[in-house]
Amino acid sequence: MSSTTTAPAALDASKLVIHKTSTPKEKLPNEKLVFGRSFTDHMLTIPWNRTAGWGTPVIKPYAPLTLDPSAVVFHYAFELFEGLKAYRDPKGQIRMFRPDKNMIRMNKSADRICLPTFENEELITLIGELLKVDSSFIPSERGYSLYIRPTMIGTTPGLGVHTPDDALLYVICSPVGPYYSTGFKAVRLEATDYAVRAWPGGVGDKKLGANYAPSVKPQLEAAKRGYQQNLWLFGPEKHVTEVGTMNFFIAFKDSNGVKELVTAPLDGMILEGVTRDSILALCREKLDKKEWKVNERYCSISEIEERAKKGEVVEAFGSGTAAVVSPVKEIGYNSEHISIPILPGEEAGALTKQIAEWIAQRQYGIVESDWSRIVKEQTS
Ligand SMILES: *Cc1c(COP(=O)(O)O)cnc(C)c1O
């Protein structure tokens, strides 16, 4: 065999090998589920090597990885991840929500840090197989789902900073409950300009692990002052970019009563959230065009401050797969407290609640849409 003339293998779901666990875990009751703390019985792993290409995909018992301590992931952050969810519809079918979007984004992240790219549909098929093997972990109650965490790391040993010649793509899954166990809980944000999450020419639009560790300290600082999350500002204009690890939306109304939903444009600093995209699509489709405008545009903290004073801020929320929407009730900026309206006696604005419902209906297949990817389970 002349391996030198063989092209590296493409990712091929038909090569899948499954080793099932002989010691299934005891399942936690739904109310004991904590986001990302407990995992299903199995994981999917696929090795990659520069010459051989993608190796055999294996579903095997969830277990620690063994890596050389000099592996590039540990030293130079050759790591990227994704986050998506699978839901059970009223018929008991498993549905992934827009996995195609996550695959596109994962490949962009991989390309940016010289990790291997792969065939989107093959990985979606393989994740579907993992979901079938671990299907008993997918809760069926509304509000519950299975969080899926595809990950890729560079595994080549050696301390030189160079392109990894070996990588591991793996997928783990965690059954999760509603982000807000007792309905919504509106949060207070600290507008942050002393620390910067992302910058032009940087990698803020990629889901690279390296973007997240540095964001934890500013969050702890904000927490000391009573704020749950950072509202990341950027540039001399102090544009609002994102909130914590979520995209940010704010709704205004002008003096004629016309309302505008605003989120930052995808200028390379903003993570291309699947939830963000879903919200924009739904709002553009469903909101009354005489009453609402939906805009991707820059918005500064001073615009929010000034318009809040005039009573022109309607509501604000963060968006992401984990919480879907996270309502905001206050923004602290310098020594000011900018109040953001929420419905009287409630913890969210009317549009925030409406969006949460629209999205949940599509995630759980209450409303059929081409955003759902149904995992076909054989009935034997
Ligand atoms: C993951 C993430 C989001 C949300 O993306 P979704 O695809 O909606 O989950 C937003 N901002 C940052 C920084 C993120 O890491």
Image (tube, grey):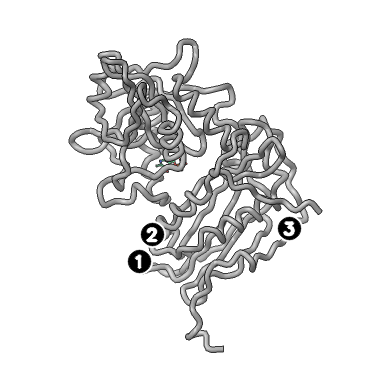
Expressed as whole percent of the image width and height from the top left, the position of residue 379 reads: 78, 51
Seen in the picture, residue 141 relative to 338 is either above or below; the reply is below
Expressed as whole percent of the image width and height from the top left, the position of residue 275 reads: 46, 38
Residue for point 26% across, 27% down: 301
Residue for point 40% across, 20% down: 329
Q: What residue sits right under mark 1 in the picture?
A: 161
Looking at the image, which residue sits at the far right?
380
* Mark 3 and mark 2: Cα distance apart in space: 34 Å
Ligand 1 occupies quarter: top left
Crowd rating for badge 2 (residues with CA inside 10 Å; few <14, some 14–19, many 20+): some
* Mark 2 and mark 1: Cα distance apart in space: 7 Å
Please say if the residues under marks 2 and 1 sit with CB atoms less than 8 Å apart: yes
Question: Which structural element holds mark 1?
Answer: loop
- Left or right of 43 in this view: 251: left
Crowd rating for badge 3 (residues with CA inside 10 Å; few <14, some 14–19, many 20+): some
Seen in the picture, residue 343 relative to 164 is either above or below; the reply is above
- Marks 1 and 3: which is nearer the front? 3
Of the numbered discs 1 and 3, the one sitting upstream in the chain is 3
Nearest to the observer: residue 166 or residue 252: 252
Q: Quadrant of the C terminus?
A: bottom right
Disc number for residue 76: 2
- Left or right of 176 in this view: 207: left
Question: Which structural element holds mark 3?
Answer: loop
Q: Amino acid at mark 1?
A: Val
Q: Amino acid at mark 2?
A: Tyr
Q: Quadrant of the N terminus?
A: bottom right
